[in-house]
Image (spheres, helix red, strand yellow):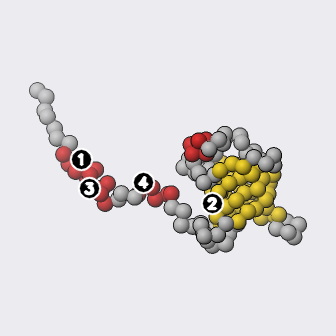
Amino acid sequence: MLRKTSNWPALALLVASSAVFPGAAHAHHSFAMFDKSKFMTIKGVVRKVEWKNPHTYLFLDVPDGHGASKLYALEGSSPNELGRWGWKMGTIKTGDAVTVGLFPLRDGQPGGLIYSVTLANGVVLKAN
């Protein structure tokens, strides 16, 4: 004999949790750490590229004007979104000289949210 069971408790829990935590799934997408009222441009050499979800990262050695350099950690859009804008996984490689337009970190640390990347050949790539 087959016994009919109800999934009512599980369904009720699912509905209640989605009502209580509607933004939890998107919490990692906050850009509050970036100052979007400021825009800056930096030039440097790519040390590392991280092409992964949910966001890409570009690590750039930027000369500090005193013979040394600072490492900037720059956050970009998702690989999927960058792909729609013409990027490919190998578009930017370690050792490439690039110019990056960005919104800096609010805390003054060397980093920011990538707005665009200009390659050495003059091609401008949208990044946000």
Q: Is residue 79 visible?
A: no
Q: Which residue, given by chain and number where applicable, does mark 2 sit on?
A: 113
Q: Amino acid at mark 1?
A: Leu
Query: Closest to the observer: 39 or 90?
Result: 39
Report, in whole angstroms, how far the alpha carbon at label 2 lies from the one at label 4: 21 Å
- What's the mark number on residue 79? none
**In this image, 29 relative to 109: left or right?**
left
Report, in whole angstroms, how far the alpha carbon at label 3 lies from the one at label 2: 35 Å
Q: Give the image quarter of residue 22.
A: bottom left
**Residue drawn at 81 percent across, 51 percent down:** 97
Q: Quadrant where the N terminus lies? A: top left
Q: Outermost residue, left direction? A: 1
Query: What percent of the width, then of the height, locates residue 16?
Result: 26, 55
Q: Are marks 2 and 4 in contact (CB under 8 Å)?
A: no
Mark 4 neighbour density, 10 Å: few (under 14) some (14–19) many (20 or more): few
Q: Which residue, given by chain and number where applicable, does mark 3 sit on?
A: 16
Q: Outermost residue, bottom direction? A: 107
